[in-house]
Amino acid sequence: MKALVLQEKGQLPVFGEQPHPVATSGEALVRVAAAALNHRDIWIMHGQYPGITLPIILGSDGTGRVESVCDGEESWVGQDVIINPSIGWGDNPEYQANDFTILGLPRSGTFAEYISVPIENLVPKPDHLTAPQAAALPLAGLTAWRALVTRAQAQAGDKVLISGVGGGVALFAAQFAIALGCEVYVTSGSDSKIEQATDLGAAGGVNYRSEDFLKEASALSPKGFDIVIDSAGGEGFGDLVRLLGPGGRLAFYGGTCGRWPTLLPQHMFYKQVSILATTMGSPKDFSDMVAFINTTKLVPVVDRVFTAKDGDQAFSHLDSGKQFGKVVLSFEETT
Ligand SMILES: NC(=O)c1ccc[n+]([C@@H]2O[C@H](COP(=O)([O-])OP(=O)(O)OC[C@H]3O[C@@H](n4cnc5c(N)ncnc54)[C@H](OP(=O)(O)O)[C@@H]3O)[C@@H](O)[C@H]2O)c1
C-alpha cells in the first residue's frame, strides 16, 4: 500500500510503498478515505516530541470504510467510520491510563491507504459530512470538546474567549461554543482569521499581536470571561488569566509558546478562578462530541485538501501557520 512516512527528523515525510497492515484480534482493517494533520505531526516531524521511533507512518485523524474485522462484530464491515485516536484511555473519565497512546506514534497512523485499529475506537461517520470534513474531526474535535464542555463546563450564555482561532483545536472550540449558545470571542495573529471566525458566528475578536491586547480584549467583556480556552501559553498566558471574570475557568491543552512567566497569584485567588489542564479525551467525550455533531449538523472547517501523494506540501502548509481550519489528505485517488 501507499503511505506517507517520516524517515528522518527535520525532513518532510515521503510518500511511498509500505507493507499492508494486518488486523489482529479485536482490530479492524480500515481503507482510509481521508486523514487530517494536527500540530502534533509537525512537532514529531521537527523531532520535538518524546518517544519518536523512525521510520513511522504519522497521522492521528482518519475516516474510511471497514474492510474486515478480526474476532469482532462483523456488522462493522462495509461501514463508513471515523477513528477515535485515543488508544487505551482506560476506565477513569478523569484522566488516561498509564499505557494510553495517541494514534500515529508509537502505533502506525492514518496517513496510509490502510490502517488497523482497535474495533472499540471505531465510530460511525456522521452522514452529513464529506470524507475530508469527517477526517478533520477526531483529534481536534475531541480535544476541544473535553476542554470546553467536560473541563470548563460551558453552558449557553457563557462568555467564552478562544485564543489562536486559526488553530485546528481552537476553531473547533469556537464552533462548539457558538453551537452551544455561548457568546464567543476569539484572538488570532491574523485580522482576516478573526473576520472568518466572526462570519461563523463569533461576536468579535482581538489580534494577540496588538500592543494594547489586554485593554482591547477587556473591552470585549468588561466583567471578564466565564471561560478562556488556550494552547499557546508563553508570555501572553498571564493576560488570558487576567481576562477571566469571577469564578472563571481557563482550560489549556498545549504550550506552543512555552512557560508562563507573567502568571501572578494575585490575579487568580480573589476571583477564585480555575486553571484546568486537559488532554485528548475519554471514549465518552468522543461519543458525546460525535452525538453533538450529529444533532447540530455542525460542519468542521476544512482549510485545504491535498492528495496524499502531495502530503509533504500539506505539512509545509500547516507548518506555515497560514491555515484557517484543518489541513486534510485525500487517499481516494491513490490507486
Ligand atoms: N493536549 C492535547 O490533547 C492536545 C491536542 C491537540 C493539540 N495540542 C497542542 O495544542 C497546540 C495547538 O495544536 P493544533 O493542532 O490546534 O495547532 P495548529 O492547528 O497548528 O494551530 C496552531 C495555532 O496556534 C496559534 N498561535 C500561535 N501563536 C500563538 C499565540 N502567541 N497566542 C495565541 N495563539 C497562538 C495560531 O493561531 P492564529 O493562526 O489564529 O494566530 C496557530 O494557527 C499544539 O501545541 C499542540 O501540540 C494538544
Image (spheres, helix red, strand yellow):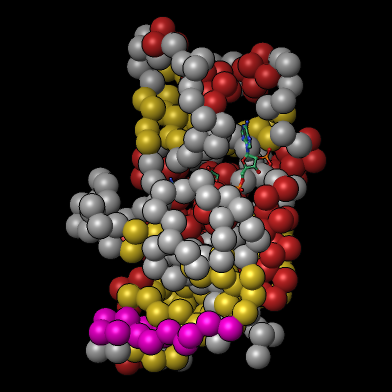
1 versus 91 height, above or below: below
Q: Quadrant of the N terminus?
A: bottom right
Is residue 266 toward the left or the right of residue 13 in the image?
left
- Quadrant in which ligand 1 is drawn: top right
**Rendered location of residue 305, percent (x, y):** 71, 68
Query: Which sits in the foreground, 278 or 246?
Result: 278
Instruction: Report if residue 289 is visible in the image.
Output: no
Magenta stretch contains residue 179 = no
123 versus 209 height, above or below: below
Highlighted magenta segment, given as a residue range? 17-29
**Rendered location of residue 202, percent (x, y):** 66, 40
| Residue lying at 30% horizontally and 84% vertically, measured from the top left | 24
Instruction: Report if residue 116 is visible in the image.
Output: yes
**Rendered location of residue 44, percent (x, y):** 52, 53
Determine which quarter of the picture holds residue 215.
top right
| Residue lying at 32% horizontally and 81% vertically, measured from the top left | 27
| Residue lying at 37% horizontally and 36% vertically, measured from the top left | 277
Determine which quarter of the picture holds residue 278.
top left
**Rendered location of residue 54, percent (x, y):** 47, 64
